[in-house]
Amino acid sequence: PTLSCAMDFTRYLAAEWKPALGCTEPASIADATALAAAAGSGPVRSVHLVCDPRMYKNCYAVGIPHSEHKTGIQWTVAIGALLPDPAAELECFRDITPAILEQAQQLIESGTVTVGVDAARSDLYVDSRVVREKGVGRAVLEGGHTRVAQLERDGQPCDLPAVLGSEEADASSALAEELATLDFDAAISLARAITPDDRARLRDGCELNLAIARHGLSLFPKSFMDLIGVDQMTRISRLVCAGVYARMSGEDFTVMTLAGSGNKGITVAVPLTLWGQEALVTAEEVEEALALACLITSQTTLRLGTLSAACGCASAAGIGLAVGLVLLQGGGTDAMSLAVNNMVGNVTGMICDGAKMGCGLKTMTSVDAAFRAASLAMAGVGIPATDGIVSRHGQGSLDNLERIAQRGMAAMDAEILNIMQEKLRQ
């Protein structure tokens, strides 16, 4: 079945277009740890985390908001055990105080914070256990950044308001199945039928992501964003880079995430908003192009996995952006298919080596590639099906991309993790 229009897109946005403060993976781990801590009381004695390799990878070097520029997974876990409100979910870092930082440092220095990686886990997995003076809590996330699969107090199952209910988990699974079957025609119909409330929610997200992008410019030398002699596409890609760099640095800005990633949200929202202003199209057309780009980004993310060996900003958000740019320029499904082929034949293979400041450069590359892919597609130019992993149609190329990311890059992902762990021992 394909998605029907207004109601389902509203449900889609509720699941895939969410605000977050800081990088999504550290926020997810910290909130799970806060949830585990809430099952006990009294001083925190120790904190123990086991996560999948890709969650570890994305927490390895990224900045934590409100933490005086702390970075890394040990700080994430220690802070999470001390946060007061697990209901804050992906905005939990807003509750960090100097006292929490001091206590977190004491936990780390005492050696009572441990982090392990379950190499057998291929999907998102977080298992956080907090030992307090009175009680031991455990929270397990599986398959989603806020999807609580298990909660325990002193080894016994328990329930708290913050736990994701089974009905919501079932709805999320149903949405994934519907997105998996969505073709370009159905996605366009859905995007053009969005409600006024959907449009307002999309606009609100764009404003958040533009704000951090503009702030990010202050973190770069003036020469990086010198507007003299630089075309609009280059300015936009540099602005995206600045926003992602600011987010990865832990700057205090809430962003609107897309498909579990704030970087994807920035990569899609900022270029479509600004290019729409440059192209002098209507606000409604920009909103519909953004809706389509979001749907294709989510669909591609499902193919790659919530966390992937491949860079999601290039291989998911970049593809979604290219399709949205085609719609914004009046192109149809044939041009969209060419744009996808151009992206798959260009950026496939860009690795994900964790969330960090270098993600800004990768997003800049993916935005540049998306503009080129869409421009060529609008002129009827696409990488032919005889070349490499490209198929006759964009959906076929996405099938091949999925094979490369899920199977072909698996060994590479393990080697990246080995390199990171070796660096910690140096």
Image (cartoon, rainbow, N blue to C red):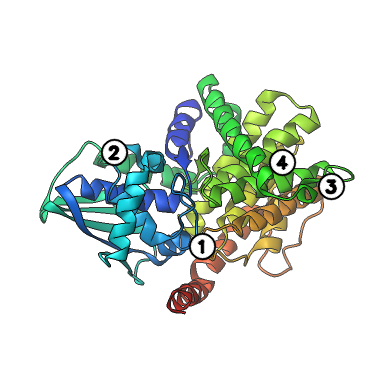
In 3D space, how far apart are the residues under numbered discs 4 and 1 (Cα atoms)? 28 Å
Q: List x then y, in percent, for residue 245.
A: 61, 51
- Mark 4 or mark 2: whose residue is earlier in sequence: 2
Quickly name the residue at label 4: 325
Which of disc 1 and disc 4 is earlier in sequence?
4
| Residue of label 3 | 379
Please state, as top left, top right, bottom left or bottom right, where the N terminus lies in the image.
top left
In percent of the image, x 38 and y 57: which residue is there? 75
Looking at numbered disc 4 in the image, what kind of residue is underneath it? Leu
- Which residue: 38% across, 55% down? 76
- Residue drawn at the location 43% of the way across and 46% of the way down: 176
Q: Provide residue 175's location: percent of width, then percent of height.
A: 41, 42
**How far apart are labels 2 and 3 at the CA level?**
53 Å
| Lateral position of residue 68 relative to residue 275, left or right | left
Residue 85's label in the rendered image is 2
Q: Residue 173, percent across and down?
A: 36, 46
Question: Quick one: SS at disc 2?
Answer: loop
Residue nearest the observer in this picture, 34 or 365:
34
Q: Residues within 10 Å of mark 1 (few under 14, many from 20)?
A: many
Discs 4/3, front? 4
Measure the C-alpha gap from mark 1 to mark 3: 36 Å
Give the SS element for disc 1.
loop
Q: Tell me, yes or no, whether the two marked residues, 4 and 2, touch with CB atoms within 8 Å.
A: no
The residue under label 1 is 354
